[in-house]
Every structure is written in structure tokens, then in C-alpha cells.
Image: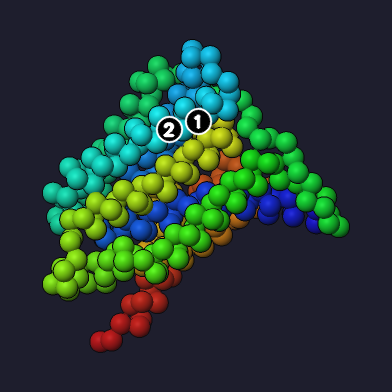
Amino acid sequence: MAYLIQILLNGTHTGALYALLAYGYVLTYQVTKRANLAHGAVFAFTGQNFILFTSYGWNTLWLIFPLALVFGAVAATALSLIVLVLLARVVFPPIVERSPNTMIAASLGVSLCLMELARIGADTRDFWLPQVLGSPVNLGGIFPATLTENQIVNLAVISTILIGSELTLRRSRAGRYIRAMSDDPLAAELAGVNKTSVFSASVISGGAYAIIAGILAATYFGNIGFGAGMVFGLKVLFIAAAGGFSVPILAAGGAFLVGLCESLWDGYFPTVYRDVALYLLLAFILATRAESHAQERPL
């Protein structure tokens, strides 16, 4: 039982990272209505640059480690925000009204570009961060279970962001504009909503969740591979689809459950087959949901 509890606790951290990614993905999807493979690439690009600039600040600029972390976070965030602004104002606007395949191809190209930029910037070398807040914290109780300080901080940050974001989405004017554009873009425009501004804000704010997730993941894992953008781009697409594209918080909840399932698989089954099992499960959920919708559709 203690082993199971520890696995589930570790799964909460993985699930929280997935939830943050899925929330941002659906926030953008509500307005674009198009699959965006670049979301995972922004996540990986941010994490890779965070590690690269932190290493540069520590080894070259001789900054103390906490200051090097701040330097890396600021530099990585600035670069990723530039990418998001270009996506929101240059890359996506001309193609969002076209075929869905056009958006998929464009976002795939962006993913490959970001992956290569990160690889070239690191000179095809893997940089690793030293352990950040890695001391275990005993949670007490009947069964011995621990989380690292890093996991606890990440869980607190992600929970705060998701709760605050959901309250903002439900109660703020910006949230009403995004919901209006999601429900009926034409009616929203007739009511005075600026479609261009809402589109840009949705892409940038949705990508901001990927930026935060990338920094948090980098501090925890210490390294993010150059191919992670493609992996997470596909994974977050399937996860968000299983949780539902219409409500960000439901997608986040579904993503959290996927993180728990991944942790359980790692604890009891061969890790090499984990992603295969995950994609099969998500495909089954999507197929079941599509069949139920088809049965509910009136003739």
C-alpha cells in the first residue's frame, strides 16, 4: 500500500504539469478551433532555453545559482514570448480560417524550427541543471510517503495558477470575450468584440501556460531533450481531446488523470510501452465519445 501511495503522489506532480499544458492548449483552441502542435514545442523550447541560459549565467557570468535561475527564467520567457507574438500576429492569422490541415502543417513546421533552434543554441549538447529543491519532505500518516520540495512548490504554483485562471475566465471581461468567440464568433463580432485582439490574446495567454510548465518541468527533471517538443505536442493534443476541447478546466482534469495513469504504469509495467498504452487508451476514449455523439445526433 505504501508503494501505491508513493506512486500516486508522484503522479500528482506529472498530472499537474499535464493539466497546466492542457489548460493553455484548450484556452487557445477555444478561439482558433484548430489543432496546434506548436504548443508542446513552446513548452520544450522554454525549458531547454531556461537550462541553457541558467548554465551560461552560472558557468560563464559566475552568478550565484539562485540568480542564475532567475536569469535563465527571464531569458527563456522573453524568447518564448517573442515566438508567441509571432505566432499570434504573423503565422496563425492568415491560415486559421483555412483548412484544419493547414494549421497542423504550419504548427508542425514551427515545432521543427523551435526544436532545431534549441539544438543549435546548445551546440547539440545536453545541459543538466543541478538538483533544485530536491530534499524529500515526509508527509507523515500511517504509510511513509514523501514529495520533494520541488514537487510541493510546483504543485502549489500550478494549483494557484489554475484556480486563478478559472476565476478570471469566468468573471473577467477578457474571459467573457474568449467564451463569446468560442461559442459564436460572428455574433461576438456583431456585439462589438474585437476578433483580432481576442485571437492574439488567446494564443499568447494559452502559450504562457506552456512557458510556465516548461520552466517548472526543467527545474524538476533537470533536462528536456531536443525531441520533447514533438512528443509533448502530440501528447497534449490527445490529452486535451480526451478531456474535452470546450472547457479548459475539464481538459486540465482529464490531463491530471492521465498523469496519474502514467505514474501507475511506470510503477507496475515496463516503461518502454507506456506511451503506446497511453495513446491506445486515449484513442479508445475518443472513439467511444465520437460513437456516443453519433448515436445522440437526431436523424
Separation of residues labelled 2 and 1 (CA atoms): 6 Å
Amino acid type assigned to the residue bearing label 2 in the image: Val
For residue 267, side relative to residue 34 (left or right): right
In front here: 93 or 172?
Answer: 172
Q: Position of residue 274 (x, y in %)?
A: 56, 47
Question: Which residue corresponds to the image point at 64% horizontal and 40% vertical from the top-left?
Answer: 150
**Whether residue 141 is situated above or below residue 153 in the rendered picture:** below
Q: Is residue 251 above or below residue 209?
A: below
Residue 299 lies, in percent from the top left, at: 25, 87
Query: Which label number is shown at residue 74?
Result: 2
| Badge 1 element | helix
Task: Residue at 57% x, 40% y: name it.
Answer: 272
In this view of the protein, can residue 231 be seen by the observer? no
The quadrant in which the N terminus is found is bottom right
Most extreme residue toward the right is: 142
Q: Residues within 10 Å of mark 2 (few under 14, many from 20)?
A: some
Which residue lies under the disc numbered 1? 70
The amino acid type, in three-letter code, at marker 1 is Val
Residue at position x 27%, y 66% in the image: 177
